Image: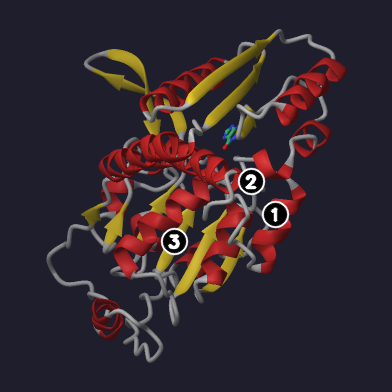
């Protein structure tokens, strides 16, 4: 039998919102399925990331001029994983473009854990360094938990230290570092929906420590009704059909189909899947998200593309966290 039709769209009445435009958005029913397909707004993460990077660059120059402090970012990469090499190169480039002091430590695949911990100790003590990032995944002989937890919480610009996870979980975000990917996703969602998600159903697919779990905490902090889903969830399409906000972070190419999408939903696609595709008779690798973009865009209200959505925002949020760390070290607001 065909699947049941999606439930009728809700009408939101937001009594607590401060911004007039926000109230307007919530009182407007979500668009319905018509006979003609609607086309979702394409959320341009690249353009937003560039705008934000401009502000970071200006504030970096001001921090140097007024307080003599240059934000310093240290990136540690262990081994030769090609994807990690690309990410780290991009992080270094972006840090330099923002006017940061940027250092990279490239360590051999077979380095001993003690040597990694010794380097992190050194960076923890170095006043010129405000942010430390150890690129994951690590080679198998290294213990990810010991290494991530050895970074000083005040320099943990990845937001992986238990102190930062705990602060986020408790809603004490004033001096916490929020993991970069969910932090970027929230900014894009706020652009579409305002800063209060009261009355909205948010569904997160994936429960990783890097994306899914902190994403859930950030959505909850903004008053969304949050459902966390994962590989053991029963009837995932049925759960997703309730989502006014959908964040997909599972690493399964095109998992989320058009008929899972609630009309008018805002979709953030965190997937970064490399798939092989025949283009002009040649097999090439193509970057694809967790959502079938073309299908979903016929139903959703707004959606991030892959590439050009979440990825560029993630790198910029690392710069944001590093500048914030430098400002906090000077006793300024983050
Ligand atoms: N590998 C993939 N994503 C990340 C991230 O956000 N931080 C670090 N350190 N490594 C990663």
Seen in the image, is 205 located left or right of residue 65? right
* Residue identified by numbered label 3: 246
Q: Name the one closer to the observer, 48 or 225.
A: 48
Give the crowd class for mark 3: few <14, some 14-19, many >=20 residues within 10 Å.
many
Residue 256 shows in the view: no
Q: In whole angstroms, how far apart are the C-alphas of marks 3 and 2?
A: 22 Å
Q: In whole angstroms, how far apart are the C-alphas of marks 3 and 1?
A: 22 Å
CB under 8 Å between discs 3 and 2: no
Q: Residue at x 14, y 69 (%)?
A: 35
Vertical side of 186 occupied by 78: above or below: above
- The secondary element bearing badge 1 is classed as helix
Expressed as whole percent of the image width and height from the top left, the position of residue 283 reads: 35, 15
CB under 8 Å between discs 2 and 1: yes
Expressed as whole percent of the image width and height from the top left, the position of residue 284 reads: 35, 17
Q: Name the one closer to the observer, 107 or 285.
A: 107
Q: Nearer the viewer, mark 3 or mark 2?
A: 2
Give the crowd class for mark 2: few <14, some 14-19, many >=20 residues within 10 Å.
many
* Residue identified by numbered label 1: 165
Q: Name the one closer to the observer, 202 or 59.
A: 59
Give the crowd class for mark 1: few <14, some 14-19, many >=20 residues within 10 Å.
many
Q: Earlier in the sequence, mark 2 or mark 1?
A: 2
Q: Residue at x 37, y 83 (%)?
A: 17
């Amino acid at each position: 039998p065909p699947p049941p039709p999606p439930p009728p769209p809700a009408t939101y009445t937001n009594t607590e919102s401060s911004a007039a435009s926000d109230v307007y958005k919530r009182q407007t029913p979500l668009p319905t399925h018509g006979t003609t397909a609607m086309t979702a707004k394409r959320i341009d993460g690249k353009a937003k990331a560039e705008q934000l990077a401009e502000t970071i660059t200006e504030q970096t120059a001001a921090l140097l001029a007024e307080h003599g402090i240059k934000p310093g970012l240290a990136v540690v990469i262990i081994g030769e994983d090609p994807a990690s090499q690309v990410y780290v190169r991009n992080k270094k480039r972006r840090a330099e473009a923002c006017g940061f002091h940027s250092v990279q430590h490239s360590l051999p695949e077979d380095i001993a854990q003690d040597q990694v911990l010794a380097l992190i100790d050194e960076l923890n003590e170095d006043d010129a360094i405000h942010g430390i990032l150890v690129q994951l995944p690590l080679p198998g002989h290294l213990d990810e938990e010991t290494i991530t937890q050895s970074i000083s919480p005040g320099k943990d610009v990845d937001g992986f230290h238990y102190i930062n996870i705990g602060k986020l979980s408790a809603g004490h975000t004033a001096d916490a570092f929020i993991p970069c990917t969910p932090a970027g996703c929230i900014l894009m969602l706020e652009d579409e929906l305002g800063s209060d998600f009261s009355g909205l159903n948010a569904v997160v697919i994936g429960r990783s420590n890097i994306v899914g779990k902190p994403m859930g905490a950030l959505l909850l902090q903004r008053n969304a009704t949050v459902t966390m889903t994962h590989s053991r969830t029963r009837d995932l399409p049925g759960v997703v059909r309730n989502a006014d906000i959908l964040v997909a972070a599972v690493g399964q190419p095109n998992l989320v189909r058009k008929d899972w999408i609630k009309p008018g939903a805002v979709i953030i696609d965190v997937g970064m899947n490399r798939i092989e595709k025949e283009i002009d008779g040649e097999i090439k690798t193509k970057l694809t998200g967790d959502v079938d973009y073309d299908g979903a865009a016929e139903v959703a209200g707004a959606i991030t593309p892959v590439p050009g959505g979440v990825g560029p925002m993630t790198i910029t949020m690392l710069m944001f966290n590093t500048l914030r760390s430098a400002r906090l070290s000077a006793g300024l607001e983050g």
